[in-house]
Image (cartoon, grey):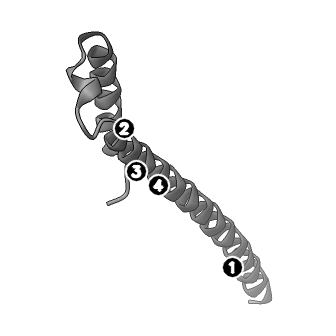
Amino acid sequence: MITLSIILTVVIVASFFIIRNLILRNERLEDFITKQSEAIEACDKRLKQIDDKGIFYADDQIGFFFKEVQKIQEALNEFTLK
């Protein structure tokens, strides 16, 4: 009976430290994802601010590049937190 109590105590203590470690890692990843989401939203806002009059979009040479940048930004927008 005593050995069973010791084994259970060791398992519970080990589980506590494992769960605590996983929670800390999860919190760090949540912070990372939040920062990435904020950076993507800032890029989207800046891209819209740069071409608020549609000058880049309408230009033939720069317009192609700008359209491609907008496609990339749209793809990144899917990864933002909503």
| Residue under pointer 3 | 41
Give the amino acid at mark 4: Glu
Closer to the observer: label 4 or label 2?
Answer: 2
- On the picture, is 61 further left or further right than 23? left
- Between 11 and 54, which is closer to the camera in this rendering? 54
Give the amino acid at mark 3: Glu
> Could you tell me which residue is drawn at 23 percent across and 32 percent down?
54
The image's mark for residue 12 is 1
Cα gap from disc 4 to disc 2, whole angstroms: 18 Å
The C terminus is located in which quarter? bottom left
Q: Are circles 4 and 3 on residues that touch, CB within 8 Å?
A: yes
Give the amino acid at mark 1: Ile
Residue 77 placed where, x, y %?
Answer: 33, 44
Q: Residue furthest top?
A: 61
Give the amino acid at mark 2: Ile
| Residue under pointer 4 | 38
Mark before the other along the chain sequence, 2 or 1: 1
Cα gap from disc 4 to disc 3, whole angstroms: 5 Å
> Could you tell me which residue is drawn at 26 percent across and 27 percent down?
55
- On the picture, is 12 further left or further right than 49? right
Residue 43 placed where, x, y %?
Answer: 43, 43
The image's mark for residue 80 is none
Q: Are circles 1 and 4 on residues that touch, CB within 8 Å?
A: no
Cα gap from disc 3 to disc 2, whole angstroms: 14 Å
| Residue under pointer 2 | 50
